[in-house]
Amino acid sequence: MVDHGTPEGLTAENRRLVKEVAQLRAELSALRAEAPSSSVDSATDPTPVTNLTNPEIARYSRHLLMPEIGVTGQLKLRNAAVVVVGAGGLGSPCLLYLAAMGVGRLGVVDHDRVEVSNLQRQVIHTERAGELGVTKAQSARDAVARLNAACRCTAHEIHLNSDNALELLSAYDVVVDATDNAATRYLVNDACVLLDRPLVSASALRLEGQLTVYHHRGGPCYRCLFPEPPPPAAVTNCSEGGVLGVVPGVLGTLQALEVVKVLLDVAPDAPPVLMLFSAFRQPTFRAIRLRGRQPRCAVCGPDATITHLLDYPTLCGQAQHDGPSTLALLPANQRVTCSSYAAAARARVPHLLLDVREPVQFAICHLPGAINVAWSELPGRIDEIPKADPIYVVCRFGNDSQEAVQYLRQAGYSTARDLIGGLHAWSASVDPDFPVY
Amino acid sequence: MANLTVTVEFSGGLESLFPGVEQTVTLPTTNAAGAPSTVKDLIQWLRDNALKEKPELFVSGDTVRPGILVLINDVDWELEGELEYQLQAKDNVVFISTLHGG
Ligand SMILES: [Zn+2]
């Protein structure tokens, strides 16, 4: 019998449960390997279907009634293979609509696992998938299977990179870029040009979204517009900047629409356009006429220098995932661990705790006694900081706090030190009840 | 000296570098070199007069940094001559940073 009242009992119970979860996961993936739906068969194109079955006619009747779609259009969807890179906020509605509308084969590429902070926008995933720690690719595949059993959907639980992208994407007719970082966007663009596949690309952040179809009917590619990646400091991701749930929902839904237009060859003479969406501003939608294919483009121009895939994380100066980076700017004697700060605070050692997160984040949670001056405002408000001894500086992940300590020390605050790992580390190593966001 | 007024908008996160999402800018009709004012002059003016912080997040040399698209009256500036486009009164110029989130 496990004694839940003692730390030893709880540790033993925890060890037993971890083992059990690992065993169940192994069983699950073994079962999935046997299941016919998970066989990686989308690479081999079956002979195209030339007639709709009676159940298909019943199911897609609302499409068939429109001359713009009709039987011909429905058969094109039925015979198409579309791959969605990223099963996040954009990929969720895109995959659901593509499956619902009767696209015959789908692929979904994502190696991340479902987390609870995804569920506010990634509507294809469930709380259950988050609890089980299922990958987003599997979770999305399962949702597609529940929605439309006839859709052959392959889950690619891998990290797309320059070694695997060409082979993987070549099995599909259209590529949907629903990723969350600059490095993967350049990778997917270059792969689509090299494979000659149209690329339906969108992005979303905070209250805004952007959408373009690249490398389609002689139009520009992503590099024609953005030959060089932006400096890493100019890139904000959803876990830093936030995003209103429905915003990627709108953009991902529009991506599904653009896929249909590509497959059905709608409006073949339309010039290339960048669609801008702004949730709280007027006008909500704006269509910008874009440049054509650029003769100087390094990947799609006549004198292209990029003939194989590159090292994209290095090119973009950042990791190929959407998450906090970890800087190490300060020498060890200017830093303290959360647990040693906790000990000092418990012993009531006099000090100043300066929280340099933005006020919206400070309002979510903060440590007792902390004063809040955001890092972005610190230079203008330096006079408000008393010359206390010592000064501890904290932020969310422990990056801004280091920059703030450097700044404070240059301004004469020679006792400033940062809390290593920020409030995330505080929650992990000192107080598990402290909220994580 | 004659002036011309244009409206300028920022989006894709650039608005945080400036006082607001939209502003009107009045420039002399001709620049210091005596030529008609261009988008290049506008970028310089914004850098020197409107930018609150971190110029490297807006400019690189005498143009915008990589990852910023400029729209002139809802058209990609590449179709309008880029830096050399001659500003007209009431033009609408949008500076938009490409987004990567998904
Ligand atoms: Zn190109």
Image (cartoon, rainbow, N blue to C red):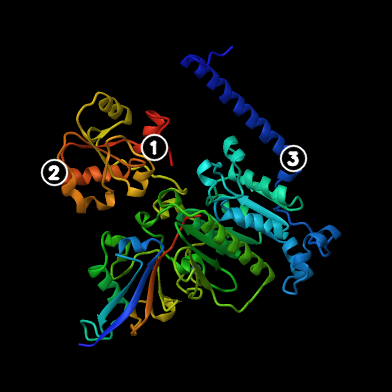
The residue carrying pointer 1 sits among few (fewer than 14), some (14 to 19) or many (20 or more) residues within 10 Å by Cα, namely many
Left or right, residue B28 beside residue A324: left
| Numbered label attached to residue A35 | 3
Q: Which of A428 and B36 lies nearest the eye of the viewer?
A: A428
Name the residue tied to disc 2. Answer: A412
Name the residue tied to disc 1. Answer: A424
Q: Earlier in the sequence, mark 1 or mark 3?
A: 3
Q: Amino acid at mark 3?
A: Ala
Left or right, residue A434 beside residue A94: left
Distance from Cα at disc 2 to Cα at disc 1? 28 Å
Image position, residue A254 (x, y; %): 59, 64
Q: Nearer the viewer, mark 2 or mark 3?
A: 2
Q: Are marks 2 and 1 on the same chain?
A: yes
Image position, residue A52 (x, y; %): 83, 62
Q: Secondary structure under badge 1?
A: helix
Q: Chain of mark 2?
A: A
Q: Amino acid at mark 2?
A: Gly
Residue at x 27% of width, y 49% of height: A375
Q: Earlier in the sequence, mark 2 or mark 1?
A: 2
- Judged from this view, the residue extending furthest toward the bottom is B2
Q: Earlier in the sequence, mark 2 or mark 3?
A: 3
Residue at x 45% of width, y 76% of height: B74
| Numbered label attached to residue A207 | none
Distance from Cα at disc 2 to Cα at disc 3? 66 Å
Left or right, residue A255 beside residue A357: right
